[in-house]
Amino acid sequence: MAIMARVAAGAITLFARFITAVRAVWEGIEPIPRQRIYFANHVSHGDFILLWTVLPARMRRQTRPVAGADYWLKSPIRRFIGRDVFNAVLIDRNRDTRIDDPIEQMADALDGGASLIVFPEGTRNETEAPLLPFKSGIFHLATARPAVDLVPVWIDNLNRVMPKGEIVPVPLICTVTFGAPLRLEADETKDAFLARARDALLSLPKAEEGNA
């Protein structure tokens, strides 16, 4: 199973690069193997795949996406990709059926040495707004593990590569921009932290701005 997972991971990253010609842009941060929480905008189920793809191999191996169990456990193929290929931290988003606390799950993954990919909006943004309001989870995670850097990441163009309702991807160049890290400040309130984190994400350069 481990060999199959490695082969599948290689195939997925090659396919992602072939379709999107994705490139990483590092703004105020270096691609070094340090434990981090990457928080990104969310427009597609492929978001974490693209972010994971552009990480250097040594960082990719220690980085785990946080994803909804209801989606990634829905079929044997998704289960294999989510659990075995990406080693995702799978969260039950249904409060009525939830057994494990999501913050504890993520904190345990960090304690095990992993970096995380999280999406503070909590669901895919299908609106015209650049970002949905942030859920409180990223604040509680920052409170639980304040020594871990939080890195804003803007994923650009993926919503046009895989428009809603389409099966065949449209080849377009995508960028994944990593910003300067931040941490929860002493006595910082939840609302102030969420606003600061959201502003950090929105401040990252977009492809449209770069081509203006």
Image (cartoon, helix red, strand yellow):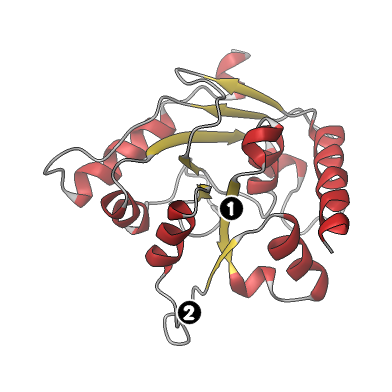
Q: Residue at x 75, y 56 (%)?
A: 85
- The quadrant in which the C terminus is found is top right
The kind of residue tagged 1 is Pro
| Residue occupied by mark 1 | 65
Q: Counting residues from the N terminus, which is met first, the one under dot 1 or under dot 2?
A: 1
The residue at 34%/33% (across/down) is 199
Instruction: From the viewer's side, name the closer residue of 134 and 189.
Output: 189
Relative height, residue 149 to residue 67 (above, below): above
Q: Residue furthest left?
A: 187
- 198 left or right of 211? left
Q: Camera-side residue: 191 or 105?
A: 105
CB-based contact (under 8 Å), mark 1 and mark 2: no
65, above or below 62, in the image: below
Q: Which residue is mark 2?
A: 94
Comparing 139 with 87, the one in front is 87
Which quadrant would residue 156 be assigned to in this image? top right
Q: Name which residue lies at 55% across and 31% down.
A: 33
